[in-house]
Amino acid sequence: MADIPDPDFCLPLPRHGGDEFAEDLDARVGSHIKQAEQAMMAAKTAALRPLGLTVPQYAVLMSLHYVPGQSSAQLARVAAVTPQTMGTILDKLEKRGLIERTPSAIHRRVLVTTLTQDGAELVLQADDLARGIEERLGRAFSDPERRQLRALLQRATSTLRGETPEVQPHG
């Protein structure tokens, strides 16, 4: 049976004091999501550093591994960066010889990006490292817990996007 969301849930108003701050911060789900995201990014950053890659660069290379020929705008959405930041990322990857950008066959003003042979080899090395972090995280949970965690995070995302979240049974 699914837990029913609490429509009456309210956070306490800000108070004074260190203990009060810690309690109030602990009650905010967003702070826990942010801490987990920061820990994931720090772990992946450290793992990818020896390869000379950042997490957004890795995201771009991985996306191109799966779907070659993407535009800068598509890659910016995948890597969750601004279009301007994506331009800088692509410039750096191209200078390293990891990607190639060519005019689109459909829209001549749009450049599409593909991996070079060096990029294809590097992304597989990088994914071994990133996948290891994801596997370490996954091993901290049972299979039902992983499913529940994914469902809860998907519900959080849907709620924050203003979509009607689907409440999933847990267990």
Image (cartoon, helix red, strand yellow):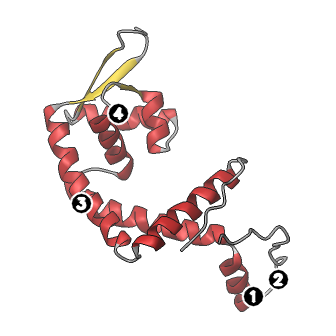
| Label 1 vs label 3, nearer the camera | 3
Q: CA distance from mark 2 to mark 1?
A: 6 Å
List the residue tagged with mark 1: 20
Q: As shown in the figure, which amino acid type bears the numbered disc 4?
A: Leu
Place of residue 159 in the rendered image (x, y in percent of width and height, measured from the top left)? 69, 54
Please name the residue shown 28% across and 59% down the image. Answer: 131
Q: Is residue 42 left or right of residue 2?
A: left
| Residue 19 percent across, percent down from the top left | 71, 91
129 lies above or below 104: below
Crowd class of label 3 (few under 14; some 14 to 19; many from 20; radius 10 Å): some
C-alpha span from label 2 to label 4: 46 Å
Left or right: residue 98 versus residue 23 is left
Q: Counting residues from the N terminus, which is met first, the one under dot 2 or under dot 4?
A: 2
Residue assigned mark 3: 129
What x and y, as percent, mark residue 132? 26, 64
Q: As shown in the figure, which amino acid type bears the numbered disc 2?
A: Arg
Q: Secondary structure at mark 3?
A: helix
Residue underneath mark 4: 90
Q: Secondary structure at mark 2?
A: loop
Mark 1–mark 3 Cα distance, whole angstroms, equals 40 Å
Residue on which the image places disc 2: 15
Inspect the image, locate mark 3, and give the three-letter code of the amino acid beneath it. Leu
